[in-house]
Image (spheres, rainbow, N blue to C red):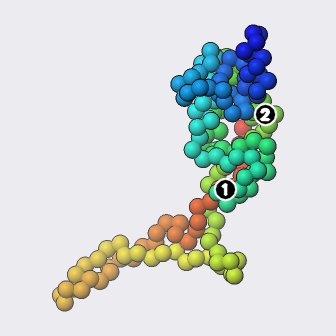
């Protein structure tokens, strides 16, 4: 291992990569380490659009973990990307991340919306007119009503176990 490898390892980055570990050491998005296949997996994982940093609140939950939690689909993509790599570093990284850390991820949670003063109630679903016609008087009348899907719920996230071992 050369001096550069020790430096990146000390900073929490897997040697030979610039994106695998605590943060990244890449100078640009295109800057990748010589362990290219693994670094591509880590870079994609690092750019997950839905993430919750350590000890932060977001998406209706608080992350008590020392590391960021990402959307479960991003962890699934990361898992599959590492599995495809023939590199032993990919296996080591996958085993550490999924087997040792046993990561939890963010998953959609459809919870009922309740007014603060009435915690047991839910908002009734929104009814809409799906089919209209004009009457002889020129007025519009509804022939068929429908419900907007999930209109009585609010989209939130919950922390869930990833559920797969590497």
Contact between labelled residues 1 and 2, with CB atoms less than 8 Å apart: no
- Closer to the camera, 63 or 29? 29
Q: How far is the residue under mark 2 from the one under mark 1?
A: 26 Å
User: In the image, what residue occupies the spot 76% across and 12% down?
Assistant: 3
Q: What residue do we see at 62% from left, 35% from top? A: 45
Label 1 residue SS:
strand
Q: Which residue is mark 2?
A: 99
Nearer to us of marks 2 and 1 is: 1
Q: Is residue 160 visible?
A: yes
The furthest residue to the bottom: 137
Residue topped by disc 1: 58
| Quarter residue 72 falls in | top right
Residue 161 is situated, as x and y percent measured from the top left of the image, at 74, 46
- Mark 2: give few (<14), some (14-19) or many (20+) Cα within 10 Å: some
x, y percent for residue 137: 19, 90
Name the residue at 79% across, 51% down.
64
The answer to whether residue 94 of the structure is visible from this angle is no
Q: Is residue 117 above or below residue 155?
A: below
Residue at far right of view: 100
């Amino acid at each position: 291992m050369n001096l550069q490898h020790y430096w990146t390892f000390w900073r929490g980055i897997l040697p030979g990569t610039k994106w695998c570990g605590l943060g990244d050491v890449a100078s640009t998005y295109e800057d990748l380490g010589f362990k290219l296949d693994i670094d591509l997996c880590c870079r994609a994982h690092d750019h997950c659009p839905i993430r919750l940093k350590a000890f932060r609140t977001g998406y209706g939950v608080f992350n008590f973990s020392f590391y960021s939690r990402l959307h479960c689909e991003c962890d699934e993509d990361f898992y599959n990307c590492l599995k495809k790599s023939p590199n032993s570093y990919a296996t080591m990284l996958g085993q550490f991340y999924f087997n040792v850390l046993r990561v939890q991820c963010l998953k959609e949670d459809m919870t009922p919306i309740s007014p603060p003063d009435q915690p047991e109630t839910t908002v009734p679903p929104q009814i809409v007119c799906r089919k209209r016609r004009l009457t002889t008087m020129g007025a519009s009348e509804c022939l068929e009503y429908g419900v907007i899907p999930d209109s009585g719920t609010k989209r939130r996230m919950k922390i869930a176990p990833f559920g797969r071992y590497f």
